[in-house]
Image (cartoon, grey):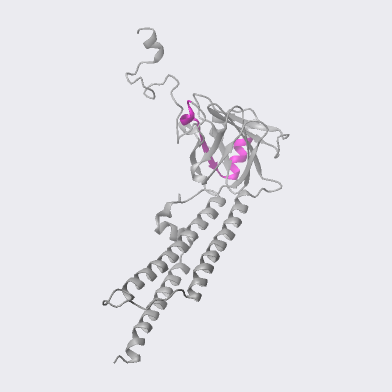
Amino acid sequence: MVSRSSVARPRVVRLAGLGVGGAMLLALLSGCSANDIGDKLGGFGWPRHGITEQAHTMYDLWIAAVIAALVVGIFVWGLIFWCVIRYRKRGDSLPVQTRFNMPMEVLYTVTPVLIVAVLFYYTAIVQTDVDKLSAKPDQTVEVVAFKWNWQFNYRDAPGKDAKTVASTLGSSDVIPLLVLPTGRKIRFEETSRDVIHSFWVPEMLFKRDVFPGNTRNVFEVTLDKEGRYVGRCAELCGTYHAFMQFELVVVSPQKFDQFLAAKQSGASTQDAMAAIGYTGDERFAVTTRPFDTRRHGQSWNQSGDTPNTVAAGK
């Protein structure tokens, strides 16, 4: 005959193990920020180190959701393995047959609903924060997309009736530079002259389509890291879609004011870049380059000859 103490001891050991494991997990999570945990997990499928305040908020939500999913997964896996070991076949007799367990049925119904409700709540909060527009942004930029380049208009106020105080226009020979400051609320107002494009800087962890006609897509970000980042069109828009690029140059507020003042005085974008300390090739894009309009090495003509010389028999 088995004593009650020998049966109860394994349960006590299991509960103690779960308690110690839970305490260690809480201690680990309490000592780390979402960024620290995310770095240890390699971002867990999400790009790390965004350059806007909104990107950090989205990243924190993603890592929190990953942690919650891992906790639930470990708990479920533990139950599965415990049932496999605890109720494994020990003889030819059938185990006790039960039709249902009301507390377990309620638990399995209520718990997923609570998990989904919590995730939905925090997702709605982050989404509202990302889409939030301020009454008076610090700087408004009108993004004008066209086949296959960009024009960036610095405006004196939000809205289509505002005035453009300075502008940067890209060409086949020069990548357009979008210079913006850190620590200020930047509003982007997007419009297209022909087809649907998409304004995307990967490090912003955010993109939004650019529509033709009267539709103006609007969003705001606050940049918090200086640097130079490649920007792209993320919507298949035609033959040279892959080469529809620009460069985002994030500088300090003081340098941005100097850059904008130089542009307003009539300086070109490259001269305005020189005015804030960028010299030589730094006055142009450094993260990407213009496509070769003669299609050297970027077409089916691998011999190096241009279509014009081939047609002329040269």
Q: Is residue 187 visible?
A: no
* In the image, residue 303 lies in the stretch drawn in magenta: no
Q: Which one is in front, 194 or 302?
A: 194
- Judge from the rendering whether residue 207 lies leftward or rightward of residue 8; answer left or right: right
**Residue numbers of the magenta segment:** 239-260
Q: Is residue 6 above or below residue 309?
A: below
Q: Position of residue 117 (x, y in %)?
A: 57, 62
Q: Position of residue 219 (x, y in %)?
A: 62, 44
Identity of the residue drawn at 40% across and 58% down = 41
Q: Position of residue 9 (x, y in %)?
A: 34, 86
Quadrant housing the C terminus: top left
Q: Is residue 223 above or below residue 144?
A: below
Q: Which one is in front, 39 or 95?
A: 95
Identity of the residue drawn at 36% across and 87% down = 8
* In the image, residue 242 lies in the stretch drawn in magenta: yes
Identity of the residue drawn at 39% across and 74% down = 21
Q: Is residue 224 above or below residue 292?
A: below
- Judge from the rendering whether residue 19 lies leftward or rightward of residue 126; answer left or right: left
Quadrant housing the N terminus: bottom left
- Judge from the rendering whether residue 67 lies leftward or rightward of residue 166; answer left or right: left
Q: Is residue 104 above or below residue 244?
A: below
